[in-house]
Amino acid sequence: MAISVRKGRALKRKLETGVRAFAWYAGWVGAFALALCGLLWLAPASTWDGALGLKASHWPVYTLVALVTAGLLGWNFVESGQDRIEKRVGRGVSAVLFVVLPLFCLASTLWPDALSREIGTGRDHPVWLFVRWYPPLCTIACAAVFLSWKSRPRKRVYWDRGLGYALLLAPYAVLFAVLELGVRLQWLDASHRETIDALGSAAIVLQIVLTFFVSAGD
């Protein structure tokens, strides 16, 4: 039994390491792609439309895919921030903060009837407010810890490092604000619709990536 548990933990660690390695490298590819999309936006469409198979009409699609891919880098940063919190508070407290409470929030969101019978359906009740805001606030806290760590690796604050990492975190922050906080961005909504239409059935992959990596940071 003990051997099976150890094997299970080793497999879990290997899977997590693989996912984070993928997110790291793919995120950098996405960051460069997003920068390229910015350059294409600044350049007249006539100068690059048709070059290397690119189409000016598909610029919103390129931008959204690059934004999602670049967001994987920010997800990795959030995970690193969570790692630092876990080291500070210990295994027991971290299990409550990052496993028990998020699972409670997830269960309450997926199956709200049981909780509603206990406290009612009023969304201003403290428990419902906790269910709604604990996961995103937890993600924000992890991101803040990561940026604080990178901005102040020693005794003084390195503002240039902090700004650089904040810019790399920005694509994830945009997706997080839209998907988790309900912020509406018209240009992103339009790009999302065009991307879904352009990708067709393959758009499900984009949806899965969005859902997994943004919600997994909670």
Image (tube, rainbow, N blue to C red):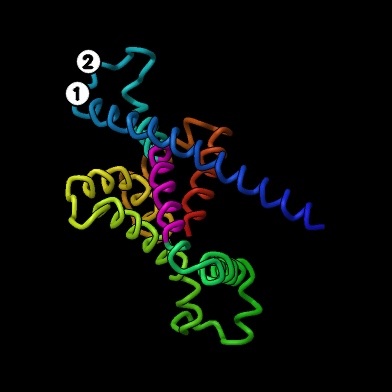
Q: Residue at x 31, y 51 (%)?
A: 185
Q: Residue furthest right?
A: 1
Q: Decide: is 9 above or below 95.
A: above
Pick the front one: 73 or 3: 3
Q: Which segment did they paint magenta?
A: 68-84
Closer-to-camera residue (5/121): 5
Compared to 90, does 8 lie above or below?
A: above
Residue 49 within the magenta-colored segment of the rendering: no
Q: Position of residue 167 (x, y in %)?
A: 26, 44
Q: Which residue is mark 2?
A: 47
The amino acid on which the numbered mark 1 sits, given as a three-letter code, is Ala
Question: What secondary structure is marked by label 1?
Answer: loop
Q: Could you tell me how many numbered marks the image carries?
A: 2
Query: 119 above or below 190?
Result: below
| Disc 1/disc 2 C-alpha distance (Å) | 7 Å
Q: Residue furthest top?
A: 51
Residue 176 screen position, x and y as percent: 39, 54
Q: Marks 1 and 2: CB-CB under 8 Å?
A: yes
Category of crowding for the residue at label 1, using alpha-carbon neighbours closer than 10 angstroms: few (below 14), some (14–19), many (at least 20): few
The residue at which mark 1 appears reads as: 43
Q: Quadrant of the N terminus?
A: bottom right
Give x and y (percent) for residue 11. 67, 45
Tag 2 secondary structure:
helix
Q: Position of residue 108 (x, y in %)?
A: 59, 72
Which residue sits at x=48%, y=60%? 218
Main SS class of the magenta portion in the image: helix
